[in-house]
Image: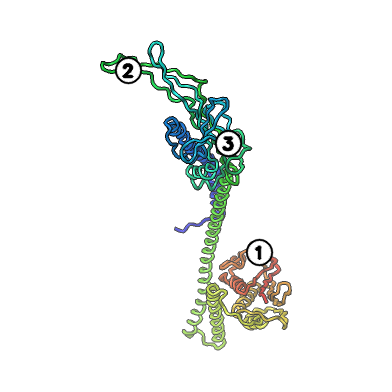
Amino acid sequence: MHLRFGFRTLIAICVTLAVLLGVVAFVQYRWSKRVLAADLQREREHLDLSASLFASRFNRNLADAVGFLQNDAQTAWTTNAPLPSLPTLIKELYLVDISGAQPHALRANNAGTFSAVATPNWMHPEECAATISQQPLAITTPLFQPVVEKTKQGQSLFLISHANHCFVALLNEDFIKTTLVPNLLQQSFGKSSINDYDFAIVPRHRDAQQIYGPRIKPDFRKPFFSVSLRNLPPIPGRPSTAPTPPGRIIQRYQIQTETHGPPSPPSDIWELQVAHRGLPLAAAFRRERKQELLLVVAAEFLLGASIILLVLSAHRMQRAAEQRMQFVAAVSHELRTPVSSISMLSRNQADGLVTDADKVTQYGELIHQQSRRLSEMIEQTLQYAGIHSNLGTKTRTPVNIANIITTALSVHNDELTRAQFQVEQNIPNNLPTIQGDASLLRIAIDNLLSNAIKYAANGRWIGIHAEYSTSNRAILVHISDHGPGIEATDREHLFEPFYRGHAATETNIPGSGIGLSLVRSAAEAHGGSVTVESTPGQGSTFTLRIPA
């Protein structure tokens, strides 16, 4: 089924598609805002989870060091056993005695024993309480001495004396900064986040003191560095009050502890700061959204342009198909007329209906004219097919435009004489020679002359003027007539293939609509052009421009 759409219908289709594209763009814009919020929230949750994992792993390393102090180190001291090797996180280990008037300090050596040293300036052991100091970074944990005494009632009393001794572990800050923190960041955040974010560690509420990383404006903060330090050892369970089984002796005792208030919950002393590299996190996501929107807009613009081009191409193809149909109809009609005339005239001669010598001559001339007309139509059709199949592939040779014009006029001399045309020529002899295809230029000028003879028969005047334009660096050939002129609506499509003006169609002037298309094709093959100036009722002037 062959569907035909008018130009207004195609415009309506374009407008409808444009509206649909606008609706799609609006929906994508609304959707992108939600996606932005969801992506931003998901990224923040990812940072929170990764930071929590980092804090947990860091605190686990601290807990291992504190466990060493409150278990391995205290056991070695109370049993006089050699001290095990220190964890990597502990740089130096001190044992401080504050039972006297002045505190005394012992430092662990490589042999696993403690030797007396001067109390370091940074150490202020007023009491052996579980604390964490930051300048320098050190952990203090007390040692307790349990004592069992008998009461007057004959019961045992389990006493825990106040700690007069404590371990002070100086942490290895270089190891923390250069090894522990980078490794934990890599493990917790992953390689992609390490490349996208900057990380810094500062003391809480004191951002001016930088511990690790560059100074940044954080998008996310996570407190860490907390560990549970015991001010008291675990309280042993009370002995059972049940009767003593036969044959067994159980010592019953009471437990009293000396405390200095409830232990304070551990608090984080450091803060991990995370900042998106280059832009703040929200701004980076907004920029990414804008870039995606620009890509979407560009894609939709290209899609819209493609739709418009497709619709216009469909319209042009429809017009071209209609013009081809008109061409086929016109050629069929034009071919039928000379063929019918030749058939009738030749039949009359063959049947002996024409015997007079003058009549025979007249019939012969008519047959010759119709044959020539038929030959010209066939030649023009072949020229159109040949030019459009080999455009721009012809060889270039030196061509004299004046000779081309003279040859074209000589071919049409008899026709001009019979139609009583007045021909005015102004062709300088000093026109420059151009590099071109003589046959293509001959086709162009021949078709312009044929059009002037055909459409300006009432004016009976043709003017041919050639000149060299220094400003355009081209030869201009003007062919004018005093015909009916061309309407403005027809001038827009005059050089399109198979197009025929309204005046030619209404007055039944013979033609196929490819002559002026041949002229334009020949001019463009030489890098030139053809234009027309016309005033209805006064005539037309066609100008062929060929670069020289």
Numbered disc 1: secondary structure: loop
In space, the residues marked 3 and 1 are separated at their CA atoms by 98 Å
Furthest toward the top, the residue is 153
Which of the numbered marks, if any, corresponds to residue 487? 1
The residue where tag 2 is placed is 250
Left/right placement of residue 426 relative to residue 220 reads right
Q: Is residue 126 above or below residue 531?
A: above
Sequence-wise, which precedes: disc 2 or disc 1?
2
Q: Residues within 10 Å of mark 1 (few under 14, many from 20)?
A: some
Residue contact at pointers 2 and 1, CB within 8 angstroms: no
What type is the residue that disc 1 sits on? Glu
Residue 255 seen anywhere in this rendered image of the structure? yes
Residue contact at pointers 2 and 3, CB within 8 angstroms: no
In space, the residues marked 2 and 3 are separated at their CA atoms by 50 Å
Residue 147: image location, x then y, percent: 43, 21
Residue 461: image location, x then y, percent: 69, 76
Sequence-wise, which precedes: disc 3 or disc 1?
3
Numbered disc 2: secondary structure: loop
| Colour scheme in use | rainbow
Give the foreground label among 2 and 1: 2
Residue 41 seen anywhere in this rendered image of the structure? no
What type is the residue that disc 2 sits on? Ile
The residue where tag 3 is placed is 136
Sequence-wise, which precedes: disc 2 or disc 3?
3
In space, the residues marked 2 and 1 are separated at their CA atoms by 130 Å
Give the foreground label among 2 and 3: 2
Q: Residues within 10 Å of mark 2 (few under 14, many from 20)?
A: few
Which of the numbered marks, if any, corresponds to residue 521? none
Residue 532: image location, x then y, percent: 67, 69
Numbered disc 3: secondary structure: loop
What type is the residue that disc 3 sits on? Pro
Q: Is residue 243 above or below residue 285?
A: above
